[in-house]
Image (cartoon, rainbow, N blue to C red):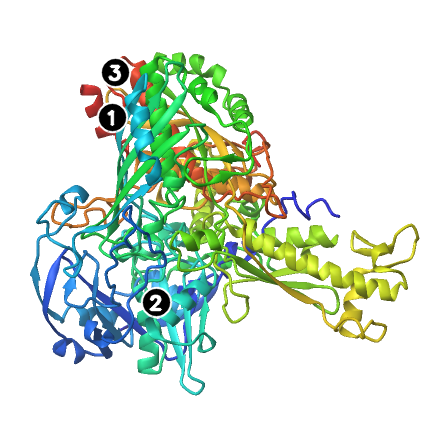
Amino acid sequence: MTKITMTVNGKSVSGDVEGRTLLVDFLRKDLRLTGTHVGCDTSQCGACTVHVDGVAVKSCTMFAAEADGADVATIEGQAAPDGTLNAIQAAFQEHHGLQCGYCTPGMVMAAADLLKNNPKPTEAEVRHHLEGNICRCTGYHNIVKAILAASGQDVSQIAAE
Amino acid sequence: MPKDSGIGASPKRREDIRFLTGTGQYTDDINIHGQAHVYFLRSDMAHGKINSIDTAAAAAMPGVVRIFTGADFEGIGSIPCGWQVTDKHGNPMQEPAHPVLAQGKVRHVGDPIAAIVAETLEQARDAAEAIDLDITELPAVVDMKQALEPGATKVHDDLDSNLCYDWGFVEENRDAVNKAFEEAAHVTTLELVNNRLVANPMEPRVAVGDYNRANDESTLFTTSQNPHVIRLLMGAFVLGIPEHKLRVVAPDVGGGFGTKIFHYAEEAFCTFAARQLNRAVKWTSSRSEAFMSDAHGRDHVTKIELALDADNNFQAIRTETYANMGAYLSTFAPSVPTWLHGTLMAGNYKTPLIYVNVKAVFTNTVPVDAYRGAGRPEATYQLERLVDKAARELGVDPIALRRQNFITQFPYATPVAVEYDTGDYVATMDKLEEIADLSGFEARRKESEARGKLRGLGVNCYIEACGIAPSNLVGQLGARAGLYDAATVRVNATGSISVMVGAHSHGQGHETAFPQVVADMLGIDDSMIEIVHGDSSKIPFGMGTYGSRSLAVCGSAMVRATEKIINKAKKIASHMLEASEADIELKDGQFTVKGTDKSCAWGDVTLAAYVPHNYPLEDIEPGLEETAFYDPSNFTYPSGAYACEVEVDPETGKVTVERFSAADDFGNIVNPMIVTGQVHGGVGQGIGQALLENCVYDENGQLLSASYMDYAMPRASDVPFYTVDHSCQTPCTHNPLGVKGCGEAGAIGSPPAVVNAVVDALQSGGHTHVTHIDMPVSPQRVWAAMQG
């Protein structure tokens, strides 16, 4: 067992982990932050996406021990302390960008990473960025629309309900 | 009524707040103090005789609590099948036993052999590796036709053969159908495969069994679309636990698509083990495990023929399908290729004579059962590919051929038992031509060709039968359950309302849409209404959410219960307003005496019900809570027309979907935003089936596509924005909401559109020998087809 310490959503936390403990399991089981989800075991689905030191990472593909000393952001830290949704979260709700909600934390974290580095992406750039995030419910239409809307671009021409 | 409230509004979803902030409660988020974890050791061979299972070394490993094998389940019931199909000779289907853990043999890769319960999951997994298995490998049957050959290895030694049933429908019409083919001016034949799929909801399955010895109560938390169904099947048929001692809870469920309907061995195991060990036992499926233990979908091999007269009218359809059941019968499996498929073979057309034959076959593969559409995608695909092929052979426009044969008079009694109540196929086709800008296709084709790409247009119709289902009808057809649903409307003293429903949303937004219905009826804001679902101890007995049934059946129960509430509330109001009941009107949350300005508010009446001081106690009881069970009198029949445009790269065979348009008739619509989302999702899955997804076994029964490395799930870059319209609305005639349901339509109508488009693209590029390519229409298959 190894003792690790990290900052998660601005709060310092520590725990004892095995060498093989994945970051996602440390978050979900040790820290009880169950908003980050596990959807596959081959690193493809993206439901486990978090930010580690400002970069989007699939937390199923990283050992908790590798995040020792890191600054980790998860879905639980995205809204304001009073519960107000951030721009991406609000856009997902506005545009029905989620149905069952299981892929959603990963989508929101991936979207945040995209918009940080590419504030006004094209539709093609959004779709390409989401290659690492699988959704089975929405057919992606409203997810892409929500991300474009969150970037401040006009989505009124995209077919709606 | 505020704009964003009531039927027809699209209020933002309430569910979104917890899902967007990571505070949903999915089953894996549930942890019970003192829980143990179970890991299932599964067969890595498709067929084998178990000689011995030596768990001694494993049992001694750190943290291991107990190891269970099939021997621990002697005397425990078999995982039941919920539908008995009768074959064309009037004999019941062959129905093998399905033990919770393998007994005697393993019959598919993934069949669970041992369950290792330990303090942590890692300890359970480590111990599994120390189990010594002595299994003699047996030949595997994988191909359905080979499985039916005389002398083929039997999946189940106690059955006569690998044939589950040979079903004919309608058997009495078979000779007339054959005669019509002999006399036809033209016959079109098509052989096709409806490829085996894995549903892959993003949330893998989870089961947490718990036991309270003090009051002998078992609780199962499970990723299910229908907690009461699980309670009945597991409690009554497997574990022998009476319902009042068995609570089943489905919390937030991350997608289902049919796969989470069925009662699975893992659920029974966790419930059983918790009782045995007097502590909670938790199982979480990995994705690889899901590929070999979640029920698969589709897997039909079909030959279908269409007989036409000299004027291109459809005279008869004849179809023969081999339907894979897998190694065991999953809950609904036998009904999918029969009653949910054969009865749809008329489609949107007036064909007078139809005969459907289905041979259901056992193979050494994972059990196959319903997956979004369940039988209707299979029917639509074969019919709509066939009509397209016929159009091409006859040299007529594929839309014109369809229009010519449309059913136009309703109700319409099909020759395959079902009667469509309403529809307007002309309207949805007209709408499709408009929204898909079909008249602009030729120009778009030229533009694609200028860039070196082939472009194709595929159009098709669909009809489906959903809002499952009338209990007495399905009972006659072999269902072992009723298919009604239920709602309890509990009005609180200060006017807020809790509605307990038997449906269970797993993405469909019931917490938002259902209150809209009740709010509309009472004239109050939907924020005053809360939905309770998923917990068998809190809700009336419902059959759950699948088959596009929640609004049509559970919603109707909700309407009936609310009508009872209104009826009673008016009695209370009439007493308070000193008027006759017949003169009381309820509008916008106010009870008014007709023709006067005497009124009282909803909240006044609800308070009176619970503080009955000015109240007709001699006539009615206090309180304001009503329950209704609703059994539908028919299926509902959504229908529509779809168009897909693809580009094909002639060098690589790669197909891209450039445009997809869907014109659907869902009858009345409660929440347009949610309906649109359902169509988007269904179309995404249909495109996935048509171009990408394939669950593949080799000839030894090894599952080759057992993770996302090898099973191609559609990504955002595989699909375009969709154009969706549901303004054509012919309301359902037989439920109080006039709704038809919409959850499956997208997945039903889309695969033929895509494949029709690819064939059109290749034909336009001069590859006139290509009349069909089987799904998934991968680049390799397209390229091979082009080579001839």
Query: Residue B657, located in which quarter of the rendered image?
Result: top left
Tell me the CA gap for discs 2 and 3.
52 Å
Three-letter residue code for mark 1: Val
In terms of depth relative to the viewer, which is nearer, B450 or B783?
B783
User: Residue B259 location, x and y as percent?
Assistant: 36, 53
- Label 1 element class: helix
Q: Residue at x 39, y 17 (%)?
A: B312
Mark 1 or 2: the one toward you:
2
- Label 3 element class: loop
Q: Residue at label 1?
A: B782
**Chain of the residue under the numbered disc 2 shown in the image:** B
Tell me the CA gap for discs 3 and 1.
11 Å
Three-letter residue code for mark 2: Glu
| Camera sees residue A115 | yes
User: Residue B686 location, x and y as percent?
Assistant: 38, 37
Check residue B535 in the rendering and tell me which mark sits there, or answer none. Answer: none
Above or below, B445 relative to B217? above
Three-letter residue code for mark 3: His
In terms of depth relative to the viewer, which is nearer, B503 or A89?
B503
Contact flag, marks 3 and 1 (Cβ < 8 Å): no
Dot 1, crowdedness within 10 Å: few (<14), some or many (≥20)? many
Query: Residue A21, located in which quarter of the rendered image?
Result: bottom left
- Label 2 element class: helix
User: Residue B23 location, x and y as percent?
Assistant: 50, 61
Q: Residue at label 2?
A: B267
**Chain of the residue under the numbered disc 3 shown in the image:** B
**Residue reaching furthest bottom?**
B214
**Chain of the residue under the numbered disc 1 shown in the image:** B
The mark that comes first in sequence, 2 or 3, is 2
Dot 2, crowdedness within 10 Å: few (<14), some or many (≥20)? many
Q: Residue at label 3?
A: B767
Contact flag, marks 1 and 2 (Cβ < 8 Å): no
